[in-house]
Image (tube, rainbow, N blue to C red):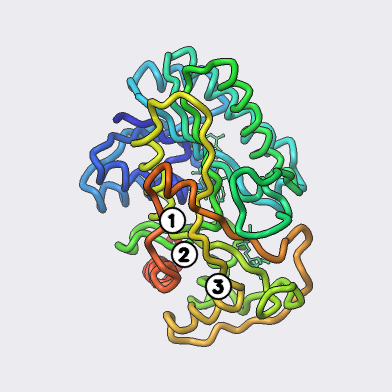
């Protein structure tokens, strides 16, 4: 299949391009490079031997999208392009609604004009807010707690309404838990701009000497060691989840919703100690107050993806940490250095 990958130069998009190529699909990347670098395309080529077609531009730009669809006869779209920093979304909510909601609506409008009716959308476990219990199932109530989460939830709801009105469309909402890890070549990985918001990139930067110590946000949660518990999933497993959704559902009309997680929870200190063992060095940390908006525990029930897509995460915590460390130690300054 020829697949348009919006945000394909980003962290999850680039790994998905590799898996698409490996499985005989043809990705076409569009990205405005606001949070990624064009060198990613060289790395994809280096790993796969194939350079994806690339057009630089913004998903909010209708004339750009018209050009994209006129140039490439794509069968389906995977829509990663978006902004994802929770803290920034609180400071700049309009920027988030503009990119994540308006950008999605614009994309769907231009897909419709180009007669393409198959879409996979990057959603997030954040749409569950503070779940009443874990593991989280797809039919749990949704209630986002910050503008980023609300932008994902709004986009989901717009897509549901749109699919209801256009029943021949296939729209798959994939709710990611906590993507971590890197490609095992050490050539691609997560390259956050500025101070990382997420745990594992922060730990990796401490391990490589770019930062002095990790702040652990709270050790008084009702969890086994008091620190927050999350469902960390290897980015290549996550990428494979998109392939499974594409293979099974690209031509199945309907609105399809799946958690993409492992079903296993790990605490902040579990992650820190796993990283220390792999990097063979101590990782200094200090306990800090809880981070506003954080929840104690969040992990998926991945049964639905397994039953319908035949997909489940394969890579364990050790592999996630080893691959992150390989990427970080080979590229201490990410793609920039
Ligand atoms: P990323 O920032 O690495 O990738 C997003 C890409 O989209 C970047 O390359 C960026 O330059 C591009 N982009 C942003 N705005 C754009 C626009 N208006 N037009 C064109 N391109 C644009 O992020 P990621 O971690 O790969 O996340 C991909 C998607 O998955 C995002 O929608 C994100 O919200 C969602 N998601 C991510 C996580 C996570 O923890 N990484 C968790 C849940 C959901
Ligand atoms: N966390 C932390 N220090 C950091 C970053 C994160 O202690 O510098 C904790 C955070 O409180 C949460 C877990 O690590 O319990 C995962 O946080 P992340 O931001 O990576 O993901 P999310 O909160 O979105 O699930």
Q: Residue at x 50, y 55 (%)?
A: 261
Cβ of mark 1 under 8 Å from ligand 1: the answer is: no
Q: Which residue is mark 3?
A: 203
Q: Which residue is mark 1?
A: 235
Query: Can the viewer see residue 197 in this picture?
Result: no
Foreground pick, 179 / 193: 179
The quarter of the rendered structure image containing the C terminus is bottom left
Q: Residue at x 63, y 76 (%)?
A: 214
| 287 to 88, vertically: above or below | below
Neighbor class of circle 2 (other Cα within 10 Å; few <14, some 14-19, many 20+) is some
Q: Residue at x 57, y 42 (%)?
A: 123
Q: Position of residue 136 (x, y in %)?
A: 62, 54
* Distance from Cα at disc 1 to Cα at disc 2: 20 Å
The quarter of the rendered structure image containing the N terminus is top left
Cβ of mark 3 under 8 Å from ligand 2: the answer is: yes
Q: Which mark is residue 333?
A: 2
Most distant residue in the left direction: 49
Pair 3/1: label in front: 1
């Amino acid at each position: 299949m020829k697949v348009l990958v919006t945000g394909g130069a980003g962290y999850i998009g680039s790994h998905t391009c590799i898996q698409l190529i490996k499985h005989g699909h043809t990705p076409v990347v569009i990205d405005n490079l606001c949070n990624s670098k064009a060198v990613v395309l060289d790395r994809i080529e280096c790993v796969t031997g194939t350079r994806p077609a690339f057009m630089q531009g913004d998903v909010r730009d209708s004339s750009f999208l018209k050009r994209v669809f006129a140039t490439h006869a794509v069968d389906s779209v995977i829509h990663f392009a978006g902004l994802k920093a929770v803290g920034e979304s609180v400071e700049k909510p309009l920027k988030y609604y503009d990119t994540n909601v308006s950008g999605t609506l614009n994309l769907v409008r231009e897909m419709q004009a180009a007669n393409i009716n198959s879409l996979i959308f990057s959603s997030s476990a954040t749409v569950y807010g503070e779940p009443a219990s874990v593991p989280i199932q797809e039919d749990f109530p949704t209630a986002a707690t910050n503008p980023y989460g609300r932008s994902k939830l709004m986009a989901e709801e717009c897509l549901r309404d749109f699919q209801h009105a256009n029943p021949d469309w296939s729209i798959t909402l994939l709710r990611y838990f906590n993507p971590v890890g890197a490609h095992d070549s050490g050539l691609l990985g997560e390259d956050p701009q500025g101070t990382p918001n997420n745990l594992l990139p922060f730990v990796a930067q401490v391990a490589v000497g770019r930062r002095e110590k990790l702040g652990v946000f709270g050790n008084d949660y009702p969890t086994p060691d008091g620190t927050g518990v999350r469902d960390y999933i290897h980015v290549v497993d996550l990428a494979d989840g998109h392939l499974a959704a594409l293979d099974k559902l690209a031509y199945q009309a309907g609105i399809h919703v799946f958690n993409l997680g492992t079903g296993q929870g790990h605490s902040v200190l579990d992650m820190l100690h796993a990283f220390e063992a792999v990097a063979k060095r101590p990782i200094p940390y200090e306990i800090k107050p809880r981070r506003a908006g954080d929840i104690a525990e969040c992990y998926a029930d991945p049964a639905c993806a397994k039953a319908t897509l035949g997909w489940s995460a394969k890579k364990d915590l050790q592999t996630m940490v080893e691959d992150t460390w390989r990427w970080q130690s080979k590229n201490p300054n990410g793609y920039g250095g």
